[in-house]
Image (spheres, rainbow, N blue to C red):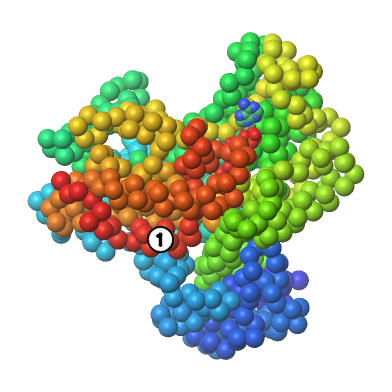
Amino acid sequence: MPDFDVDLAHADDETIRAAVAAADIPALLPALAAATGDLALVPPHLQPHPTGMLDPSFGLTPEQHDEARELAVGALCRLRDAEVPHVPVPDLDRLRTLLGWAAGGADVEPYLELLREELGIGDDLRCPQWDAATLAPDRTFRVVVVGAGMSGLAAAHRLRQAGVEVVVVEKNSDVGGTWFENTYPGCRVDVSNLFYSYSFAQRDDWPEHYSSQTVLLDYFRRVADEHELRPLIRFDTEVTAMVFDDATASWRVEVLGPDGAEDVIDADAVVSAVGQLNRPNFPDIPGMDTFAGPSFHSARWDRSVDLAGKKVVVIGTGASAGQFIPAIAEEVGHLTILQRTPGWFIPSPNYTQAIEPAVRWLRREVPGYTHWSRFWTFWRNVEGMMPLATVDPEWDGGERSVSEANDMMRQLLTGYLESEFADRPDLLEKVVPQYPPFSKRFILDDGAWARTLTRDDVDLVTERIAEITPEGVRTADGTLHEADVIIYGTGFRAADFLMPMKVVGRGGRDLHETWGGDARAYLGITLPGFPNLFLLYGPNTNIVVNGSIIYFSECEVHYVLGCVREMLTRGIRAIDPRPEVHDAYNDRIDAENLKMAWGVSSVSSWYKNATGRTAQNWPFSLLEYWQQTRDPNLDDYELL
Ligand code: NAP
């Protein structure tokens, strides 16, 4: 029997063999080659083909898999027996070779620095290599960070590393942001935690492939503790307004603390890390306030309401509802799901599963395996999917697909729904989307959606909602769907960036009036007329297919640090992006979004604002965002 409780030094051959059988070869072989310095472990004929997440064998035959596993077993035994030295960090040339191999021979040169940062083997390469006190000994530069969620913690950590004075203002009583607020049953991340984690705080002991909310909240709490960020944070305190003072070129941040205490914090710069998906969106349905029973939004789950045995009506079938509906179906007496638009579901068998003991052992015991798995996850799932979402102007797919590749994806996903709902043609008709894949967020599924919808005590209703009455929800066909409880899975006011804060920039201009409901920013980060206001997860920095939003936040934070460094070095008080640079950038974003499925599809989604513009999504590659946020070009700015 394999024993996954032992360490590598005490593992027998059977344990090693069993662990290798569960490994991702494209991560394991480079990890071993890096650890042993033996490049024979990555032979060209065993090179994977990272053809995207759709090919589980990454282009290798069973014989090649066997050969690769034998190589790995041999290398691990040699490492165990200390027959080879352990090389902690491979040099750049070796790294280049290994990354190129794992990337299937693709040209990794443009990605090299990015991948070194993301891998995080050895040094934390994103740690700022400068110090505020050295650059500007006579100047105190204070930054107020608004929000202690995922982005705010990253900003606070890096700014503090650079010796910049930081005050974090957090409206909640703890860190975690969205993972603090969304406590609904079934809540979990839909990006592998290998990638949905900070490069500077990778974990080799994630309990699940896609962690549940409690695990993630614990992760962010631990990051705050381990990096001693809590002393920087003013909890239970909300920023109500921030006003730029033209005379001093600094910000006056007005806050409302616990017990209603008002205060003002002066700041040289403000970093807004308030997120996009946190203000619940309630639909405007006649009679909503007449409902006699309890009702609540998924992001404000009311645990005082006992759902056991109750008639529950859920409005919405997006990513949140796709998680909580299967989680409550068993418990409630009867469930009515009111669906306006069906989602595309991605088959994900391990979505709710714990990490297998063999994989936990590999991550714990094989030097670098976690880091190389992070790289492999990044490479395979990230840029490779973009062509499937890109519009082919020659393609005549109507409202159903935007290119041949997109249509192929549509067929694959339709096939999945057909197999899941094989015995229920009545339901199948309702659950197959009529819009192109990638126009809305995919929902991961391990079969729970079909298991839930085919239950006798669950109804899927696609009639338009007409009104809410004291007894329940009436649809346009006149049917009353009785409810003891109504749950709104109706998403967020994502287009209302920075609401409800009042933000006043140069010359008294109001941010929300300036935006007029159509938020834009330069690189999603800076805004003309609002010097030294930096946004994290701002306009057009959301991603549909390519990876983890933490990656974006780390890029944004890197850029902000670069701006602060330049201001300290050159003695600049504040920087204000040039309107023409901002406008040209946004024109480029808009043009590119119109080449993507989410930009051209008319399906309803939170990716577009009321003007119809895609105000949320980044349409280019991850590499391009990294490149553009590498080093601020101060020619893009007016220097104050
Ligand atoms: P959402 O994707 O915006 O879904 C809202 C749902 O409510 C949709 O089904 C929408 O229908 C429906 N709806 C809205 N207004 C309605 C009305 N007046 N009448 C009937 N139905 C109405 O919101 P979400 O599910 O909360 O997800 C938002 C985003 O949060 C996701 O896209 C994802 O990025 C993120 N998220 C991530 C995770 C995760 O990582 N696991 C989990 C949850 C959320 P239409 O489709 O017709 O508009």
Q: Which residue is drawn at 54% across and 56% down?
A: 547
514 up-or-down from 52: above or below = above
Return the residue at label 1. Answer: 626
Q: Nearer the viewer, residue 505 or 240?
A: 505
Location of residue 608 in the rendering, given as x and y in whole percent from the top left corner: 52, 39
Q: Can residue 398 be seen in this view?
A: yes
Location of residue 254 in the rendering, given as x and y in whole percent from the top left corner: 27, 28
Quarter of the rendered structure image containing ligand 1: top right
446 up-or-down from 471: above or below = below
Label 1 element class: helix
Q: Nearer the viewer, residue 434 or 216?
A: 434
Location of residue 621 in the rendering, given as x and y in whole percent from the top left corner: 48, 60
Location of residue 48 in the rendering, given as x and y in whole percent from the top left corner: 63, 76
- Which quadrant of the structure image shows residue 309? top right
Which residue in the rendered view is the most extreme toward the left?
Answer: 138
User: Disc 1 marks which amino acid?
Assistant: Trp
| Side of 260 relative to 66 (left or right) | left
